[in-house]
Image: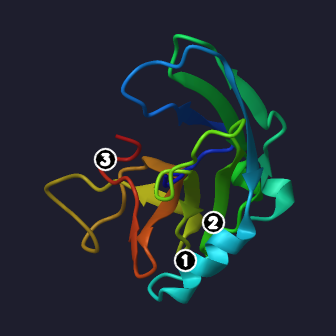
Amino acid sequence: DAVLAAGKVDPIVQPIVVNIASVDPLSSSVNFTLAIDDALRTQYNATGGVQYEALPDSTYSFTEKSGTINAGSRLDTLYVTFFPEKVNPTINYMLPIKIADASGQTISGNFGAAYFHMIGNPLAGTYQWDFKRWPNNIGPPSGPPDGASFTDVATFLPDDPTTVETPSGYYTG
């Protein structure tokens, strides 16, 4: 799951849904435990492509790591919270969270982990910009601005390691 934090300073809460993928719901409850497994990030990096650093502990909170899927049900949800103001937007980060234990039940080899990642970009970050308005019939640089000027910030959010995206338009529109 990609975690997008365009201009965010508030925490971002992401769900981790644990699903019993069986033909029928289970007849008894299943306890499970989730765990961060940085070896999964290392394995991912070994395949080539975008390389990720481990997400620093101070940039997320993952406190509730166990849950129960009740008999007759298939799902339980736990949460990880990210703090975007603490993340360096120029660095690629990954936080792999896996099902570490499922009370003896088989854990899927390809769906047993969630890879939360953030793509960094050297231009990513928050920028201040100034806006000045000229009357349509004059335009710069042949005349002075009409006195309207604004200062705002724009966040350059990485699409990938070489592309950033930011809102544009008329002032904050």
Q: Name the residue carrying label 2.
A: 94
Q: Mark 2 and 1 residues: CB-CB less than 8 Å, in contact? A: yes
Query: Where residue 121 appears, x then y in whole percent?
Result: 52, 77
- Position of 79 compared to 164: left or right? right
Outermost residue on the left side: it is: 137
Q: Name the residue carrying label 1.
A: 44
Q: For residue 23, which quarter of the picture?
A: top left
> Which mark sits nearer the N-terminus, 2 or 1?
1
Badge nearest the viewer, 2 or 1: 1
Q: Name the residue carrying label 3.
A: 170
Tag 1, which secondary structure?
helix
- The one of 123 and 81 positioned closer to us in this rendering: 81
Seen at 66% across and 18% down, the residue is 29
Badge nearest the viewer, 3 or 2: 2
Vertical position of residue 21 compared to residue 50: above or below = above
- The one of 105 and 68 positioned closer to us in this rendering: 105
Seen at 44% across and 34% down, the residue is 21
- The one of 68 and 170 positioned closer to us in this rendering: 68
Which quadrant of the figure contains the C terminus? top left
Query: Where residue 12 appears, x then y in whole percent?
Result: 64, 39
Vertical position of residue 64 compared to residue 83: above or below = above
Badge nearest the viewer, 1 or 3: 1
3D distance between C-alphas at marks 2 and 1: 10 Å
- The one of 146 and 22 positioned closer to us in this rendering: 22
Seen at 56% across and 14% down, the residue is 27
3D distance between C-alphas at marks 1 and 3: 42 Å
